[in-house]
Amino acid sequence: MHTASYYAASSVPQPDYLRLDGEQRCDVCVVGGGYSGLNTAIELAERGFSVILLEARKIGWGASGRNGGQLIRGVGHGLEQFEPVIGADGVKQMKLMGLEAVEIVRQRIERHGIACDLTWGYCDLANKPREFDGFAEEAEALRALGYRHELRLVPPERMHDVIGSDRYAGGLIDMGSGHLHPLNLALGEAAVASALGVQVFEQSPVTRIDYGPEVKVHTAQGSVRAATLVLCCNAYLNDLNPVLGGKVLPAGSYIIATEPLDEDLARQLLPQNMAVCDQQVTVDYFRLSADRRLLFGGACHYSGRDPQDIGAYMRPKMLKVFPQLADVRIDFQWGGMIGIGANRLPQIGRLREQPNVYYAQAYAGHGLNATHLAGRLLGEAISGRESGRFDLFAQVPHITFPGGKHLRSPLLALGMLWHRLKALV
Ligand SMILES: Cc1cc2nc3c(=O)[nH]c(=O)nc-3n(C[C@H](O)[C@H](O)[C@H](O)COP(=O)(O)OP(=O)(O)OC[C@H]3O[C@@H](n4cnc5c(N)ncnc54)[C@H](O)[C@@H]3O)c2cc1C
C-alpha cells in the first residue's frame, strides 16, 4: 500500500509485481524501487546486464512516489567547496551534469511516452531583495555554462505575473525546469525497466546481505546471487548497511493538496502554472496539479516523528502565502523521508571494503533529477565504459554523522536550532 497521498489517489493503474520466492541469479541486483533503483536498472539493462530489482513494498513507495514533483536543474549546493578534491574542472563538470540530469528525465519521459503530466516552467522566489540580486548572478553563471533554456528575472513589481502573493521580492524563471506527477513517473519507469528485461520484485524487503566476490542478498522467502550489488534505499535504508546509513540523515517533509480549484482561482495563484520554491532554510515549494489542486509542501523534521495532524500543521504555512485560500478544503495530506548528507552533495559511489557494492543516496529535497543522473553514472561505471564522471562524485568524502542511529537526528536538530538562534542575534 502506498501512503494515502494525492498521487496514490490519482496514479495510473499499478501492476502488482511478484514477491521474490526462491533462489535467483543475475549480473546486478538493485535494492530499492524508487527513481535511483529504477534508473540504475534501466541504464544497466540497456547496456546488456541481467538485472533484478528488489523493492520492500511497492514501486515508488518511498520519496519517489510522494515528492513535490518539482523537476529543477542542478545537483548539490555550493559545489565550489569540492574544488580542493576534484579541481576547478571537476566542479564545472558536476555543474554540467546538474543540467544534464533534467535532460535525462526529459528523454526518459519523451522516449517512452510516460504519462506523468510533465509541464515546463519553474520560478525561484526571493524572500529578500538580496536574494533577488543573487538570482541575476545565478542566471549569468548558468548562461556562461551554456544553459540553453530561457531564464528570465522577474522584478518585484511584476511578481503577480507569476504568483498571486505579495510575499516575494522577485523571481527567476527557468523554462528548462518544471513539474510532474512523481508516482506516475516511477510507475512508468518500472514498466520501462520491466520491458527491458529487468525482473522487478515488490513486497521483498532485503533482510541481510552476504558480501564477497559474489554477493548474496536475502529476503524472507528468497535470495539473489549477483556479481554486483547496488543499494538505492536512501532515507529508508535503516540498518541494512550501517556504513551508508551513518552518512544519511532521514528528515520528514510534508505536503497538502487542496480540493480542485476553479480555473480563475488557480490562474490567480500561479498564472503561468509554474512550480515555485522560496529561499528559506526550510523551503516552501508548491505548484498546481493537472486537476488544479494546489500542492503545497514544506517543513523538514529531523525528529523522526511526523506532525500529528499534517493538514493542521501545513495549512497556516500555505495561508501565509495565499490568504485567499482560507475557505478552501484540504483533501490530502502526507509526508515522506528525504535523505540528507552533511555536505549536500548526492552520495554516489562504491564501498571501499566491498568494491562490487555501489550506492546512490542523500539527495536532500532535490532528488528528482539527481536520481536520474545517479542511475546514468552507475550504469556507466558498472559497465566499465566510462568511470570518470562517476569517480568525480565517488572521490568526494562524506562524513558519518555523530551520535549513532538514535542520537543522529536529535543532535542535528540541536545544531539547526543553534544556527537559527545565531541568525537571530
Ligand atoms: C515530501 C517530499 C518532497 C520532495 N520534493 C521534491 C521535489 O519537489 N523535487 C525534487 O527534486 N526532490 C524532491 N524530494 C526528494 C526526492 O523525492 C528524492 O530525493 C528521491 O525520490 C529519492 O529517490 P530514491 O530512489 O533514492 O529513494 P526512494 O524513492 O525513497 O526509494 C527508496 C526505496 O528503497 C526501498 N527500500 C528501503 N529498504 C529496503 C530494503 N531493505 N529492501 C528493499 N527495498 C528497500 C523503499 O521501500 C523505497 O521504495 C522530495 C522528497 C520528499 C519526501
Image: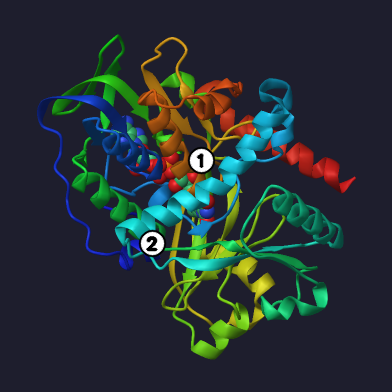
Q: Residue at x 27, y 28 (%)?
A: 29
* Mark toward the start of the polypeptide (2 vs 1): 2
Q: Tell me residue 161's x, y (percent).
A: 69, 80
Residue 287 left/right relative to 416: left
Q: Tell me residue 57's x, y (percent).
A: 27, 43
Task: Using the numbered discs, state the Cα–Cα distance from disc 2 to disc 1 in whole angstroms.
Answer: 19 Å
Residue 70 left/right relative to 5: right
Return the residue nearer the eye: 49 or 2: 49
Return the residue nearer the eye: 86 or 326: 86
Amino acid at the residue labelled 2:
Ser
Ligand 1: does it lie within 8 Å of the C-beta at label 2? no
The correct choice, above or below, for 96 with respect to 410 in the image is below
Residue 399 left/right relative to 233: right
Ligand 1 quadrant in view: top left
Q: Residues within 10 Å of mark 1 (few under 14, many from 20)?
A: some
What is the quadrant of residue 278 in the picture?
A: bottom right
Return the residue nearer the eye: 195 or 347: 195
Q: Tell me residue 417's x, y (percent).
A: 73, 40
What is the quadrant of residue 175 in the picture?
A: bottom right
Ligand 1: does it lie within 8 Å of the C-beta at label 1? no
Q: Tell me residue 314's x, y (percent).
A: 57, 63
Q: Residues within 10 Å of mark 2 (few under 14, many from 20)?
A: many
Toward the left, the furthest residue is: 22
Q: Residue at x 26, y 52 (%)?
A: 1
- Label 2 SS: loop
- Label 1 SS: loop
Amino acid at the residue labelled 1:
Gly
Residue 377 visible to the viewer? yes
Question: Where does the C terminus fall, quadrant-wise?
Answer: top right
Q: Which residue is mark 1?
A: 304
The label on residue 5 is: 2
The correct choice, above or below, for 26 with respect to 127 in the image is above
